[in-house]
Image (cartoon, rainbow, N blue to C red):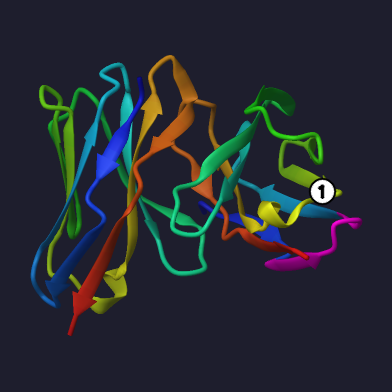
Amino acid sequence: GEDVEQSLFLSVREGDSSVINCTYTDSSSTYLYWYKQEPGAGLQLLTYIFSNMDMKQDQRLTVLLNKKDKHLSLRIADTQTGDSAIYFCAENGGDSSYKLIFGSGTRLLVRP
Amino acid sequence: DTEVTQTPKHLVMGMTNKKSLKCEQHMGHRAMYWYKQKAKKPPELMFVYSYEKLSINESVPSRFSPECPNSSLLNLHLHALQPEDSALYLCASSPLTHYEQYFGPGTRLTVT
């Protein structure tokens, strides 16, 4: 079946790096996504990675994909207070690729 | 420009009211989506439109009625809702159904 899991909470100090982890089960997923949601707002697409890639870097964001272990991570360098939000990882569900399968979300708190 | 707009931002309605939510995108995307998000949960897919035709209905009650008048607009008509339908309703669009999805800011709906 399709399942995406994330840890619920992460707290870091401003200026440190944050690493948010995600595991998924559907090996036929072609894309994996990271979305950011601030309170009361919609989801902002941060970045995504094609399943045949190992890594993708975009400014302060680095995505690592371990396809063998079905593990995805998002590293945010030099974390700022404005990065405080809920981060969702998502996969497009293989045969049901119209559908995003979301994790439960990781709440990132950045302490000054 | 990766912008999806939604109106209204907030909506309060009684259980006997009829109201509509509106979503618009001008990115030339041919797939549009409605999601429902309850507090502290990930979004749940409701409907998918592809080339202005309804392609997926995720077993949504008939008191929710989607409509896609043209390739840029998506409506969600609401009638005889229940208090448990109170949630954030998110619209999204993507170039095609298996590509990355861009979300709007959402409509916060309260049913009294």
Q: Is residue B77 above or below residue B55?
A: below
Depth check, front residue: A4 or A58: A4
Q: Residue at x 20, y 57 (%)?
A: A59
Residue, far bottom: A112
Q: Is residue A40 above or below residue B54?
A: below
Q: Quadrant of residue B34?
A: top right
* Circle 1 residue: B78
In the image, which residues are magenta?
B9-18
Report the amino acid beneath label 1. Answer: Leu
Q: Is residue A105 above or below residue A70?
A: below
Residue A78 located left or right of residue B35 = left
Q: Is residue B16 magenta?
A: yes
Give how far across and how far down residue A74 sits, in percent.
19, 49
Depth check, front residue: A28 or B64: B64
Q: Residue at x 32, y 23 (%)?
A: A30
Give how far across and how far down residue A40 sits, in percent.
52, 68
Residue B66 located left or right of residue A87 = right
Give how far across and how far down residue A96 sits, in percent.
47, 19
The subunit carrying tag 1 is B
Residue B4 located left or right of residue B22 = left
Q: Residues within 10 Å of mark 1 (few under 14, many from 20)?
A: some
